[in-house]
Image (cartoon, grey):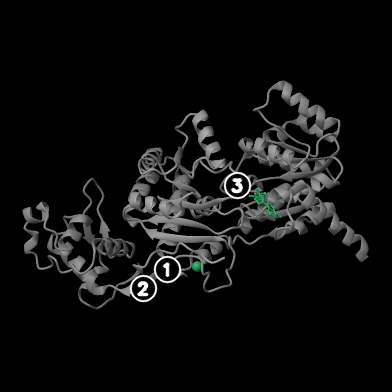
């Protein structure tokens, strides 16, 4: 009847407040918890920051016995356990970082029924003697974190996860709950099959992060752009992602020299230093971390106000995960990507050196999707959500560079003709910088040496700045109207598609960033 469910509900809210200090459940949390308490299996796809931990930590407290959590992120276990303990939950973890003595203490606690929560690595679960021991223990429920790792279709397959198929047989009457932040429908079905979940309660939460503003800007002078973003966000926490260790170091040094409180983070630093820098960031002793993508997996810092991609992210998935570290407290946060077509050849070159053919093809496909994400004029949020198989129901998200109208579509046919003509008249032997110098009428030595100040196209495009011409060249390359040759001194070449434009039979449109300042503020 009504009465018992009401008390059950009150009890949930009571625990939520007393133990976790929260007043309301986030979307989907309550229904997942309810399913688990009804001893049903559950499967949930929820975005990073969606609040997955609570979905099993709360039932772990209410159900008798120990909840085991299988997680591949050994580096995170200690933090998670510390966090749970701070809330008064009896939690522990078992992994290779513990000494033999420490491990036997944990096992003793487990066997004497004094743990609510035990985190273990999948390798451990795969051991027969460990499974035998679990059979003798009072297990309240089993949780599989990062459940996509069981699927070979996913992007992070871990063979040890296959052993988790044994869970359902090992604990016939015990609920199993699997969580992940990334699963296409195909991966989801694979997870359900492989784990053998029994008529599970399924939640696919929306991947939309309404408090995040997505802003892709033309990358023209990254150092100046980064400094300006930091200046506009002074005292706020942020992450700047760069691809290489070298550029992490250079960007850090550049920003430190300008007086910003920033520290580097990449795999080339010693364990000590990495740890020190990460802690300084978590404790708000520095504002910004400049990092390779190695950074962020293990941090639960909820007040990150901006994430900047100063280089191209590896994939849409990476972009979503990395930007997802911003605004986990639900307050507004910005995700800025500095994008230029001229970054693409470097990445392509790197991908071409990959030995494994399947990996290489995957990387090429992923890069292509990032490029089209960044270069189209479709709402960023819509594109991201569609990538994850969701349909975004609105035309205007009001919180991305496209929807905020920082872009406009302009006809650039005449300007494109100027560029094409400058390229043709110099016999397709020069690069972008020189071509821009010609149309803008630069008086530098190279122009004079080649006599290019006598060309018909010299100075015809003076009314636009260099930035405009750079953007237009990027656009013409993206539209395959021109192409860049390989090698040390890449030259611009005219492609088939340029002919009708030169003959005035086809037009060129460009999505342009309006000169008004890019969107920074957003209304709450
Ligand atoms: P996920 O594992 O899905 O990435 P977490 O479990 O780490 O997310 O939760 C993300 C953040 O949201 C944490 O800081 C957590 O304390 C907070 N959180 C979770 N549930 C709630 C809630 N009901 N109300 C307020 N904050 C919450
Ligand atoms: Zn939008």
Mark 1 or mark 2: name the one nearer the start of the chain. 1
Circle number at residue 223: none
Cα–Cα gap, marks 3 and 2: 42 Å
SS at mark 1 in the image: loop
Residue carrying label 3: 152
Residue carrying label 2: 409
| Vertical placement of residue 123 versus 357, above or below | above
Please identify, in this view, whether the residue under mark 3 or under mark 2 is nearer the observer. Answer: 2
Q: Characterize the local packing of mark 3: few (<14), some (14-19) or many (20 or more) Cα atoms within 10 angstroms.
A: some
Residue carrying label 1: 377
Is 378 left, or right, of 438 in this rendering?
right
Which of the image's four quarters has the C terminus? bottom right
SS at mark 2 in the image: strand
Can residue 112 be seen? yes
Is 361 left, or right, of 494 in this rendering?
right
x then y, percent, for residue 299: 58, 42
Contact (Cβ within 8 Å) of mark 1 with mark 2: yes
Which of the image's four quarters has the N terminus? bottom right
x then y, percent, for residue 142: 77, 43
Direction bottom: furthest residue:
505
Q: Does mark 3's beta carbon lie closer than 8 Å to ligand 1?
A: no
Residue occupying image coordinates x 70% and y 48%? 53
Mark 3 or mark 2: name the one nearer the start of the chain. 3
- Residue 451 or residue 159, whichever sits in front: 451
């Amino acid at each position: 009847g009504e009465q018992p469910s009401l008390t059950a509900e009150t009890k949930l809210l009571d625990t939520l407040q007393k133990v976790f200090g929260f007043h309301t459940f986030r979307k989907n949390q309550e229904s997942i918890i309810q399913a688990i308490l009804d001893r049903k299996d559950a499967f949930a796809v929820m975005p990073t920051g969606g609040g997955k931990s609570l979905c099993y930590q709360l039932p772990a407290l209410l159900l008798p016995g120990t909840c085991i959590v299988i997680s591949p992120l050994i580096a995170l276990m200690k933090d998670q356990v510390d966090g749970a303990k701070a809330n008064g939950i009896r939690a522990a973890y078992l992994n290779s970082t513990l000494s033999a003595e420490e491990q036997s203490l944990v096992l003793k606690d487990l066997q004497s029924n004094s743990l609510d929560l035990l985190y273990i690595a999948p390798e451990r679960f795969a051991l027969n003697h460990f499974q035998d021991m679990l059979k003798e223990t009072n297990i309240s429920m089993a949780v599989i974190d990062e459940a996509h790792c069981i699927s070979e279709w996913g992007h992070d397959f871990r063979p040890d996860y296959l052993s988790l198929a044994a869970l359902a047989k090992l604990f016939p009457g015990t609920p199993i709950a699997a969580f992940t932040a990334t699963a296409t429908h195909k991966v989801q079905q694979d997870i359900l099959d492989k784990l053998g979940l029994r008529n599970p309660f399924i939640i696919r939460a929306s991947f939309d992060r309404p408090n995040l503003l997505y802003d892709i800007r033309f990358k023209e002078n990254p150092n100046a752009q980064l400094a300006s973003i930091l200046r506009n966000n002074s005292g706020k926490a942020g992450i700047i992602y760069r691809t290489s260790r070298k550029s992490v170091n250079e960007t850090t040094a550049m920003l430190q020299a300008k007086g910003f409180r920033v520290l580097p983070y990449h795999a080339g630093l010693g364990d000590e230093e990495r740890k020190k820098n990460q802690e300084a960031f978590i404790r708000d002793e520095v504002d910004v971390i400049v990092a390779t993508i190695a950074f962020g997996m293990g941090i639960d810092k909820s007040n990150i106000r901006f994430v900047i991609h100063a280089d191209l992210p590896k994939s849409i998935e990476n972009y979503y995960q990395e930007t997802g570290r911003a605004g986990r407290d639900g307050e507004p946060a910005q995700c800025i990507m500095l994008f230029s077509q001229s970054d693409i050849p470097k990445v392509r070159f790197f991908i071409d050196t990959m030995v494994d053919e399947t990996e290489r093809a995957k990387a090429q496909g992923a890069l292509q999707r990032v490029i089209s994400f960044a270069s189209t004029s479709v709402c960023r949020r819509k594109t991201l959500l569609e990538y994850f198989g969701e349909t975004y129901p609105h035309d205007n998200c009001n919180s991305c560079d496209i929807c905020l109208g920082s872009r406009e579509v302009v006809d650039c046919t005449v300007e494109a003709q100027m560029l094409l003509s400058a390229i043709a008249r110099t016999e397709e032997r020069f690069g972008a910088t020189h071509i821009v110098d010609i149309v803008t009428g630069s008086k530098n030595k190279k122009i004079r040496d080649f006599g290019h100040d006598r060309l018909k196209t010299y100075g015809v495009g003076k009314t636009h700045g260099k930035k405009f011409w750079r953007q237009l060249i990027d656009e013409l390359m993206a539209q395959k109207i021109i192409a860049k040759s390989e090698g040390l001194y890449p030259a611009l070449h005219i492609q088939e598609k340029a002919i009708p434009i030169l003959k005035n039979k086809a037009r060129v449109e460009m999505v342009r960033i309006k000169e008004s300042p890019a969107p920074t503020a957003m209304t709450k």
